Image (cartoon, rainbow, N blue to C red):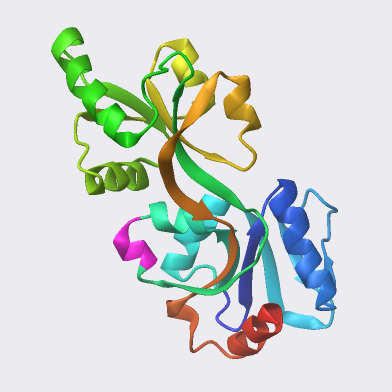
């Protein structure tokens, strides 16, 4: 990439993209694309030094850590789920007060005796004794989920990486517990799932981030400070 260009990653789709574009509009930074809304690249009127790249929020984190992207809007949850060597290269410049959600542990409503992590721990031991295997937890956040459970003294579980609809894992019989992002809890409820009373793993929201590898790039601090206001 051109060393004189400030590369900014914005979410590729959905509400996060809409909210991110609103920030630029409020700062009077007019984004345009040569091929319309589906273009993966954009530019800012009167700012030839800025290039917009639309990326999946998870991909933006990796690109920031490598210095391929200088500034990005992505989720706090995705940053904290990433490896330590990736997190070390990224600065959180501002929490943006949108994209708010919770990463939680949820179980089937049928497990009426399991209300807390202590209950889950007790059931996990009984489960292994009776069924000869560990309780399975389906999630797209294996690192955060494992670290949280270990910090609570719970170790009798198996993490299964979710590749699709995590909420469906319990009904499909592929997991007994899920760890997933929720904003209202409606999707969990629709799938007959209930959040453990002390099952909050992480509160997340969209953040303005920058790469430590880009700190010396000309004009980057000016852009960061403008977006932070």
Seen at 52% across and 19% down, the residue is 168
- 158, above or below 35, in the image: above
Relative horizontal placement of residue 170, taking residue 5 as reference (left or right): left
- 212, above or below 113, in the image: below
Which residue in the rendered view is the most extreme toward the top?
Answer: 130
Seen at 28% across and 41% down, the residue is 149
Nearer to us in this view, 209 or 3: 209
Image spot of residue 158 (x, y percent): 26, 28
Magenta segment? 83-87
Can residue 164 be seen in this snapshot? Answer: no
Image spot of residue 179 (x, y percent): 43, 35
Relative horizontal placement of residue 9, taking residue 162 as reference (left or right): right
* Quarter of the picture holding the N terminus: bottom right
Q: Give residue 113's quadrant in the image.
A: top left
The answer to whether residue 68 is magenta is no
Image spot of residue 204 (x, y percent): 53, 55
Q: Give residue 31's quadrant in the image.
A: bottom right
Seen at 42% across and 66% down, the residue is 65
* Quarter of the picture holding the C terminus: bottom right
Relative horizontal placement of residue 164, taking residue 126 as reference (left or right): right
By secondary structure, the bulk of the magenta-drawn segment is best described as helix
């Amino acid at each position: 990439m051109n060393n004189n260009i400030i590369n900014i990653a914005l979410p590729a789709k959905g509400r996060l993209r809409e909210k991110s574009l609103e920030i630029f509009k409020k700062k009077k930074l007019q984004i345009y694309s040569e091929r319309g809304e589906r273009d993966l690249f954009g530019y800012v009127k009167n700012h030839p030094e800025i290039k917009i790249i639309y990326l999946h929020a998870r991909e933006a984190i990796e690109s920031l850590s490598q210095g391929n992207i200088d500034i990005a809007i992505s989720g706090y949850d995705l940053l904290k789920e990433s490896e330590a060597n990736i997190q070390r290269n990224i600065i959180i410049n501002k929490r943006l007060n949108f994209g708010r959600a919770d990463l939680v542990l949820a179980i089937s409503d049928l497990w009426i005796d399991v209300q807390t992590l202590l209950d889950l721990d007790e059931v996990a031991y009984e489960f292994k004794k009776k069924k000869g295997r560990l309780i399975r937890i389906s999630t797209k956040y294996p690192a955060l989920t494992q670290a949280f459970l270990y910090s609570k003294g719970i170790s009798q579980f198996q993490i299964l990486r979710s590749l699709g609809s995590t909420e469906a894992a319990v009904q499909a019989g592929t997991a007994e517990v899920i760890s997933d992002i929720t904003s209202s809890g409606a999707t969990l409820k629709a799938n007959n799932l209930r959040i453990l009373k002390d099952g909050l793993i992480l509160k997340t929201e969209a953040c303005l981030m920058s790469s430590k590898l880009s700190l010396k790039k000309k004009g980057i601090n000016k852009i960061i400070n403008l977006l932070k206001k």
